[in-house]
Amino acid sequence: MRSHKVIEIRNLTPSTYVIKMEKKDFTFKTGQYITLGFSGSIDRREYSIYSSEQDEFLEVLIKEVEDGLVSKKLKRCKPGDYLDVDGPFGHFSLKEDEISEKKFLFIATGTGISPIHSFIATHPNMDYQLLHGVRKEEEAYEREAYKKNKYILCTSREKSGDFHGRVTEYLKQNPVSSDTVCYLCGNCHMIYEAYDILEKQGINLGPIHTEVYF
Amino acid sequence: MKKVAFKTLGCRLNQYETDAIASQFQDNGFKLVPFNKEADVYVINSCTVTHQSDHKSRNFISQANRKNPDSVLVVTGCMANNAKNELEGRDEINYVVENDHKSSVFSLVEAHYNGEIFHPSKLNYDLFSYGSTDKGFHTRSMVKIQDGCDNFCTFCIIPSVRGRAVSRPIQDILENVKSVIAKGAKEVVLTGVNIGRYEYENFKFDDVVEQILDLDGDFRLRISSIEPDGFGDKFLGLLNHPKMTPHLHLCLQSGSDPILLQMRRMYSIKRFMEIANKIRSYRPDFNITTDIIIGFPGESDQDFEATCNVIKELQFGHVHAFKYSIRKGTRAERMQSQVDERIKTQRSEVLREIADDVKFQYRNGFIDKEQIVLVEKTDGENAKGYGEHYVPVEFKGFKLKKNHFYRVKIKNITTDTEPVLIGEQVK
Ligand SMILES: Cc1cc2nc3c(=O)[nH]c(=O)nc-3n(C[C@H](O)[C@H](O)[C@H](O)COP(=O)(O)OP(=O)(O)OC[C@H]3O[C@@H](n4cnc5c(N)ncnc54)[C@H](O)[C@@H]3O)c2cc1C
Ligand code: SF4
């Protein structure tokens, strides 16, 4: 485990923020996660890496969870504080031989967009489409990072998104061609439902294609 | 001659490590005695998979202390990592040795008797310095190929107490296997925390298995417990090899996809079924055994029923089921919908009945067939051991010897909860 100095906190919404830390000699494969906590604290949580492999800093995208312990504490950290980083961990990763060859569909809910952001920032020339499921438009975290016609915001509580409804509803109405490689990240219910829908549409999903947050 | 006694709780890996430590003690002139006898040294290799195991470890600590209050009492294993402060605070325990330092238990005791007491954290740090375990308790020789796990299943504390996955160099493993075979081991068992994820340089798990199977000698290879992720189809192909035993302990944990996702397991039921069916397509009588957790947070009646259905469908040869209990520091500890203890108990009873039934059906299928039994215990005419499928067999024969293979024709089966096959030696 190593200590990383916080460089900057970027507040994206009243509850969601990006912590930018020094990278030091940390290396990872895009899609992986770290565990994070204040230096010396036993309370640590998993966070996907938001930044790209080639960035010279390390970023995570965090949403403060109601009654949550660590996501609340981390929101209060300031530039100059030290955080303990362990990892990288996880098998949610792209296959080298598919990156420039295949068509990708990324499906994320909430901060589940974090590793997808890292995928795309690491491999900007990928052929992808991104479905982002949130409640409100303000949760379209840094959508300017994605190509305009590649990012589809699905808002469930407002009509302000590109699609009004859940990502699973979008998938049912817009079937996916079976040669697409799909990656799913976020909450368990979405992943379970989307998995079913995609499978019926002829998509084969292996263990590396899903990342469950909660 | 000084006497040493061991008590091992929990997993096979612990058993392997106890055997290895026991070998070291024996090589240095200690006599191995049963745990309920008076000894100079007691080693408790603990486990914290369930609250019951914590409780058991505490009982064994008291028991050892009652037998000989002047003994050197060492507690190692997962409980030593998890409850270090509590254990170190108990006067009757001399040393609490964390998992990383387990291989140094003998050096510690030796140092103790030499009067040069030193703290376990200063001992040689070497996860794999166990040597072979042929002098231990089993005719099977366990060979550890990796330690630690990075999967972080949400119920499991192993990644935090055993640390990151570390794979042992393949050359070391092959040397270890050759040396145990040379010493007469007839069955080699590969162990580790998450062996399917073995990775050393360019070698993966299936490469290790393939290279061991290619070694000369009269031995058979058994894979201990394995997670259904990590290995590829090449490994499944190797299950057909004549030296490979037709048995895998493939951990399912739950038969419901939503629960598997909450557990952050790396496979779906469909994938598990595919693996099982592929294995059974090579050998329909292949013994697939498994672990099941009952009452994981959020497990509904429907989820539980799905688990029961998978057990019935896949006809597991044995189900190691335990009730979910909260492990501190895991994600599942923080999950809201914990299942009531009474429901867990009811479900355990239902599941046990199904599992017992399926196990009996499976074992009953061996009647009139032959097994190659490795004898563990014999008086020359009656012997006990395990067949290649890892099903217990008792048989009659002539001039039977321990640690030898015998062809046995199965004639009958006992009707206990652990049904044993009864047979006769094929001359
Ligand atoms: C591999 C992995 C990667 C992750 N990556 C990210 C990430 O990039 N960004 C991010 O914000 N979070 C991520 N998470 C979730 C994160 O680890 C924490 O669970 C989350 O920050 C809440 O922690 P807490 O201590 O504040 O809440 P806790 O005190 O742990 O939990 C409070 C309650 O909230 C529930 N809960 C937990 N997580 C969430 C959630 N995300 N939304 C709603 N309820 C929840 C819990 O079940 C619990 O009942 C990831 C989780 C995993 C397993
Ligand atoms: S694979 Fe899961 S259950 Fe097995 S040791 Fe690793 S974390 Fe624990």
Image: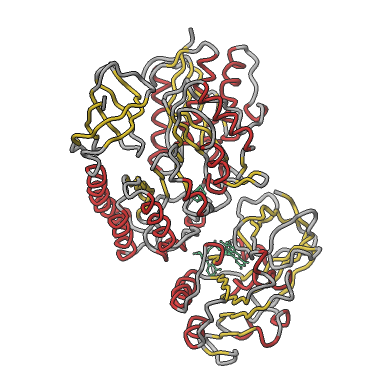
Most extreme residue toward the top is B1
Nearest to the observer: residue B425 or residue A172? B425
Picture quadrant of residue A23: bottom right
Coordinates of residue B246 in the picture (x, y in percent): 38, 42
B156 with respect to A19 (left or right): left
Relative to B351, say whether A61 is above or below: below
Residue A173 in view, yes or no: yes
Picture quadrant of residue A211: bottom right
Which residue does the image show at 57% across and 76% down from the upper left? A180
The quarter of the image that holds ligand 1 is bottom right
Which residue does the image show at 36% across and 28% down from the upper left? B374
B379 with respect to B84 (left or right): left
Which residue does the image show at 64% across and 81% down from the upper left? A140
Coordinates of residue B249 in the picture (x, y in percent): 41, 45
The image quadrant where one finds the C terminus of chain B is top left
Nearest to the observer: residue B380 or residue A49? B380
Relative to B302, say whether B164 is above or below: above
Residue B91 in view, yes or no: no
Most extreme residue toward the front is B427
Coordinates of residue A92 in the picture (x, y in percent): 60, 63
